[in-house]
Amino acid sequence: MKKIEDIVRQEQNKIGAQEILMPTIQSSEIWKESGRYDDYGEEMLRIKDRQNREMLYGPTNEEQVTEIFRSSFKSYKSLPQLLYHIQWKFRDEIRPRFGIMRGREFYMKDAYSFDVTDEDAFYSYNKFFLSYLRTFKRLSLTAIPMAADTGPIGGNLSHEFIILADTGESKIFTDKRIFDLNSEGTKLEKSSLEQLRTKYEQYYSVTDEKFNKDEFEKMVTEENRLITKGIEVGHIFYFGDKYSKAMSAAVDLPGGKKDFVKMGSYGIGVSRLVGAIIEAKYDDQNEIMKWPLSVAPYDIALIPMVNKNDTSALEKANNINNELIKHKIDAIIDDTDENFSSKIKKMNLIGAPYQIIIGKKSDGDLLEFKETGGDTQNLSLDKIIEIITKQKVTN
Ligand code: ATP
Ligand code: MG
């Protein structure tokens, strides 16, 4: 999860967002100002402090970040502001399930944008649109932006980022051709970002809340229709002055007037992504998990054949590991003396993307190397190091 978090962080920083850290426990006062203290309902975990003041465990942070914004920024000159944090959230979900996929406590990256005009705000929105496509690509996921409902966050422009999975809880209706698109070549400039949005929005792609049968059938020819299920890994919203107006977050404009700032919010389910990647990458027929190298718990598994009388293969594994460490390649060694096929099965599930198998007869310079789930090749350690290092650079 920490490796996923790092990629999410890097891609936020690349669009000029600034990291902050807000607390998990919030005062009810700001939620009363926005009107959501009553609206949010049973999903909000409400608690009291020793003075009997009403507190809550944050399910999201629009109110809190608006409070920080209004006490820190007074002028249009300070805008835009793109602020984010990566922090635990709590939602008392009616149906928590599938472990980390829908937990009550979960880890989320949430960002917030503040601008003077709608036009500037759309520019900020599009920066996040790009950063989400880049983030999911680095996690080796095909996440499709879909026009979505805004739900309790409110507002009128919103996209959910969804990856396909049979176990997913979101029903989706798309034009298949959207899967061939990517964000390559897009620059962090207004017109380039607008082109990116237009490129994606030319294809019908919605979740069930926005689904309209007539529209779908009109816009998508039969052979391009795809109706399936997916997992929501990210969600972006534009909601204008919904919170800034209710909570009086205004800035001075050039002419001397004041106006409420225009805001958006942008979430990624960091802990849900751990489960989502497993759903996407686990091959249940062959019982093989292969993590994307960018977030794999280990780069490679060393699997020596070990028994009480003969530990030479284990020694060889240790020597290989010392060499790998020098090249910053992170290995897991299965040093147990379990039978060989159960060791392979276990390592196939742990899911390091590469394996070296060190049998009894393994001597000489060539090693039995493979991509987890792939075919074995006999290669020298130098060659193996070269392959993995090259792959790491592209992440
Ligand atoms: P869902 O429809 O799945 O409940 P949401 O629309 O309520 O999601 P947002 O408020 O947009 O979610 O939160 C941003 C992201 O946080 C979601 O896209 C999702 O990846 C993640 N997320 C939301 N709720 C949970 C949860 N209970 N457990 C794990 N991750 C979650
Ligand atoms: Mg929800």
Image (tube, grey):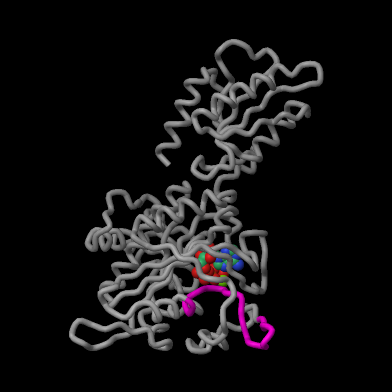
Position of residue 92 measured from the top left corner of the image (x, y, whole percent): 65, 74
Q: Is residue 141 above or below residue 347?
A: below
- Along the horizontal axis of the image, is 251 left or right of 166? left
Within the image, what quadrant is residue 341 found in? top right
Left or right of 372: which side holds 147? left
| Quadrant observed for ligand 2 in the rendered image | bottom right
Pinpoint residue 87: horizontal percent, then vertical percent.
Answer: 54, 64
User: Looking at the image, is 242 positioned above or below residue 306?
Assistant: below
User: Quarter holding the C terminus?
Assistant: top left
Between residue 77 and residue 357, name the one nearer to us.
Answer: 77
Residue drawn at x 48%, y 51% is 6
Magenta-span inclusion, residue 48: yes
Q: Position of residue 223 (x, y in %)?
A: 41, 55
Q: How many marks?
A: 0
Q: State whether residue 4 appears in this view.
A: yes
Task: Note whether 326 is above or below 197 in the view shown.
Answer: above
Q: Is residue 17 above or below residue 278?
A: below
Q: Which residues are magenta?
A: 47-64
Spot the residue most to the left. 255
Residue 115 lies, in percent from the top left, at: 31, 75
Picture residue at 60% right of the left edge, 54% below the top: 275
Residue 145 sits in quarter: bottom left
> In which image quadrant can residue 202 be found?
bottom left
Q: Nearer the viewer, residue 43 or 60?
A: 60
Task: Look at the image and say whether residue 105 sits in the magenta stretch.
Answer: no
Left or right: 36 in relation to 248: right
**Does residue 171 show up?**
no
